[in-house]
Image (cartoon, rainbow, N blue to C red):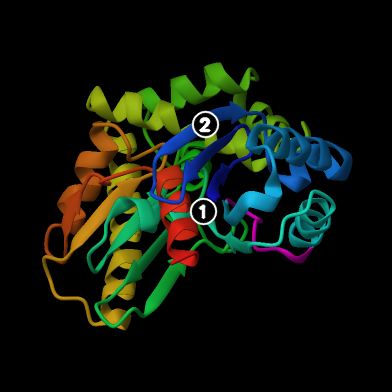
Amino acid sequence: MFVVGIDGGGTKTRVAVCASDGTLLHRETLGAFNLSAIGEDGFRRRVGEILTLCGDMRACGALCVGGAGASGAAMGEILRAELAAHGFAGKLLLCGDHEIALAGAMQTPGCVLIAGTGSICYGKNAAGEHFRCGGGGHIIDDPGSGYALGRDALAAALQTEDGRLSENALHGAVMDTVGGSGIQGIFDFVYFSRRGKGDIAALAPLVLRCAAQGDAVSLDILRRGAAELARLVSAVMGKLGLENGSPCALAGGLLAEENVYRRAVCAALAPVCRPAAPEHDALFGAVQLALAAIQ
């Protein structure tokens, strides 16, 4: 018997096939797994690639799929149909990316804070209770995320153009990137160029770069973002009754590596928890959840 863990994302899919004792049999990285990004036909092809990698699915005891949209009805319906057609009769776990991230990050009570294009905090306590805060999408939520930083960078550039802010390094960096001139250039980039949330989030590194050089406007954006992320963690810890000093793993593109934003977030979190690196990654977490399902 074997199990499969899948960490599916908008740009790549990581797959691990392990024996029932946890021994790694295969590991592969494929293209995007997000149904909305690659369409139904593309998603079926991706599932087919994964099943080919796995081999005889009749011997698969459990398959854990984690990622944005993985728990949605449309993705689940396609997965169940494709798996059944290949003889799979094991347990199928459809999880959010925050769930597999926490499962990989720690085995003790605590939480994981993820800040990439979006943001979310997810935790568990000793009683096995779970709670999430954030992750509501860029339109109404995702504070402190890459999208939020990029949006604030554009707002700062606009306010510099119209005189509400004095000239700053971030303004020049944003204007160089949007490729326009003046207020109209910002409007064209935001409203008339079919920009998606990823395009806005792609401006976040400009904020980090300018902040690292001491730009006051950029530092203020990061300070506010860090405070918002700390609010997510505080809400989760309060809901679950986690004690101050409980571990909080930092994950996602903005927090995975040492940088000026990560330092600001760690400072904001210090009064309520113990920021730490995840013990393992989200793919490891998906495998652990699959292994637990066959115990």
Mark 1, Cα crowd under 10 Å, few <14 / some 14-19 / many 20+, is: many
Q: Position of residue 267 (x, y in %)?
A: 15, 50
Please identify the residue farthest to the right as the structure is shown. Answer: 41
Q: Position of residue 33 (x, y in %)?
A: 68, 40
Whether residue 218 is visible: yes
Picture disc at residue 26: 2
Q: Is residue 271 left or right of residue 66?
A: left
Which residue is nearer to you in this view: 34 or 90? 90
Residue 9's quadrant in the figure? top right
Q: Main secondary structure of the magenta part?
A: loop
Residue at 24%, 69% in the rendered image: 109
Point out the tag, 2 or 1, that comes first from the N-terminus.
Answer: 2
Q: Position of residue 128 (x, y in %)?
A: 33, 78
Q: Is residue 36 left or right of residue 54?
A: right
Which residue is nearer to you in this view: 196 or 37? 37
Picture disc at residue 97: 1
For numbered disc 2, what is the local secondary structure? strand
Residue at 30%, 80% in the rendered image: 240
Q: Amino acid at mark 1?
A: Asp
